Image: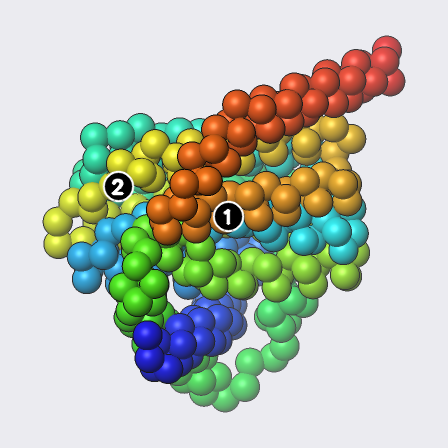
């Protein structure tokens, strides 16, 4: 493994994060100049923009024929978003969970995870599968816009303040904003090329599969914008935004990122049997476990954040042990599946039932 491998990885991540930020700023202001309300900009331009790193990497990987990287990036990002990012953010401050997330967005995240798994069950994601997934994100975005317009409150002002959309437009500002969009796209394409190249070199040098690299290094790297957004929101006291950002990102990753990657790939994206047997079920389990934790008091406490982090460490450790052929990997996996996960499921179920009884008592 050469020094250039690390250069590719680091430079690729930096360019991806910078490209996503520049693209979102330019697109948001350009849309505002055409009279599009800030709320709509926030739910479309900004939402798609936060998934831009995952989109760029997965699309580039699919075009290059590295299907394992494309799949691993999305599945690994969704797992990291909940276990790693929400875990770290909850340690900073207990997170508030809105009722809408529990009633609507988390069930949609679970549904999107199950649908993606079902489409991938035959061992590939075809263009038709990609079209179905992308149609899902269009429907979801349309529904969000409709719901938000019905009861938007101060959302317009919040988005306008965040992205400076209330500032008077300067002469020829549209040229500058268009330039930002182009620059953001160039950075994203360049960053994704470097990151994919570095990931492939790293996998070959360490003797690991592209799937494992995608599930770990690439997944965490492309989730950096979500990590930054959630941590900053927690410090600012906007603790409901931190959770909503993660749930929304996971939905977009599955429907938009994998949908686009499957549509532009020269052939159907092959899905590894290992991913179907282990990583997809883990992603679904992580999505499902959000319901009882979020429902119990409509918050994520610090101990629950620590539990998320412990599970992410265990998941990553298992991937490394399995990939390197260590004999302890099978025992470790059996212990997690046979004892730790069922015990955790029972504990969470008890917590959720108690929360439900408490809520019913308060309503009566």
* Image location (x, y in percent) of residue 232: 69, 63
Crowding at dot 2, Cα within 10 Å, few <14 / some 14-19 / many 20+, comes out as: some
| Numbered label tally | 2
For the point 32% across and 56% down, the residue is 208
For the point 70% across and 28% down, the residue is 295
Q: Against 272, is 49 above or below?
A: below
Residue 253 seen by the camera = no
Q: Earlier in the sequence, mark 1 or mark 2?
A: 2
Q: Against 303, is 237 above or below?
A: below
Left/right placement of residue 189 relative to residue 241 reads: left
Residue 317 image label: 1
- Residue projecting furthest to the top: 364
Instruction: Pick whichever, 196 or 359, lies toward us.
Output: 196
Left/right placement of residue 74 relative to residue 100 reads: left
Tell me which corner region of the image, top left, top right, bottom left or bottom right, holds residue 276.
top left
Instruction: Pick whichever, 184 or 173, lies toward us.
Output: 184
Tell me which corner region of the image, top left, top right, bottom left or bottom right, holds residue 111.
top left
Task: Look at mark 2 in the image and give the residue it sits on.
Answer: 272
* Image location (x, y in percent) of residue 197: 28, 70
Crowding at dot 1, Cα within 10 Å, few <14 / some 14-19 / many 20+, comes out as: some
Marks 1 and 2 sit apart, C-alpha to C-alpha, by 19 Å
- Residue projecting furthest to the left: 267
| Label 2 secondary element | loop
Left/right placement of residue 113 relative to residue 305 reads: left
């Amino acid at each position: 493994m050469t020094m250039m491998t690390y250069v590719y990885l680091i430079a690729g991540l930096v360019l991806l994060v910078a490209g996503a930020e520049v693209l979102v700023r330019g697109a948001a202001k350009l849309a505002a100049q055409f009279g599009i309300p800030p709320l709509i900009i926030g739910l479309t331009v900004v939402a798609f923009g936060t998934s831009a790193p995952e989109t760029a990497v997965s699309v580039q990987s699919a075009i290059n024929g590295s299907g394992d990287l494309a799949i691993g990036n999305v599945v690994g990002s969704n797992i990291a978003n909940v276990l790693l990012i929400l875990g770290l953010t909850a340690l900073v401050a207990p997170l508030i969970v809105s009722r809408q997330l529990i009633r609507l967005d988390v069930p949609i995240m679970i549904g999107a995870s199950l649908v993606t798994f079902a489409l991938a069950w035959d061992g590939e994601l075809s263009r038709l599968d990609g079209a179905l997934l992308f149609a899902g994100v269009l429907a979801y975005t349309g529904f969000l816009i409709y719901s938000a317009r019905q009861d938007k409150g101060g959302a317009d002002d919040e988005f306008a303040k965040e992205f400076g959309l209330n500032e008077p437009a300067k002469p020829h500002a549209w040229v500058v904003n268009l330039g930002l969009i182009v620059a953001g796209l160039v950075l994203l394409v360049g960053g994704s090329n470097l990151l994919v190249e570095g990931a492939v070199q790293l996998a070959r040098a360490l003797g690991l599969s592209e799937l494992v690299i995608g599930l770990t290094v690439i997944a965490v790297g492309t989730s950096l914008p979500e990590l930054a957004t959630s941590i900053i929101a927690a410090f600012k006291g906007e603790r409901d935004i931190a959770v909503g950002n993660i749930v929304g990102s996971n939905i977009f990753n599955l429907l938009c990122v994998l949908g686009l990657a499957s549509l532009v790939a020269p052939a159907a994206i092959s899905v590894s049997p290992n991913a179907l047997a282990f990583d997809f079920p883990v992603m679904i389990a992580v999505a499902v476990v959000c319901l009882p934790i979020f429902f119990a008091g409509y918050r994520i406490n610090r101990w629950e954040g620590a539990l998320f982090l412990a599970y992410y460490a265990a998941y990553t450790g298992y991937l490394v042990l399995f990939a390197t052929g260590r004999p302890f990997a099978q025992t470790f996996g059996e212990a997690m599946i046979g004892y730790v996960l069922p015990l955790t499921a029972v504990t969470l179920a008890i917590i959720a039932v108690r929360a439900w009884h408490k809520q019913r008592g308060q309503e009566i």
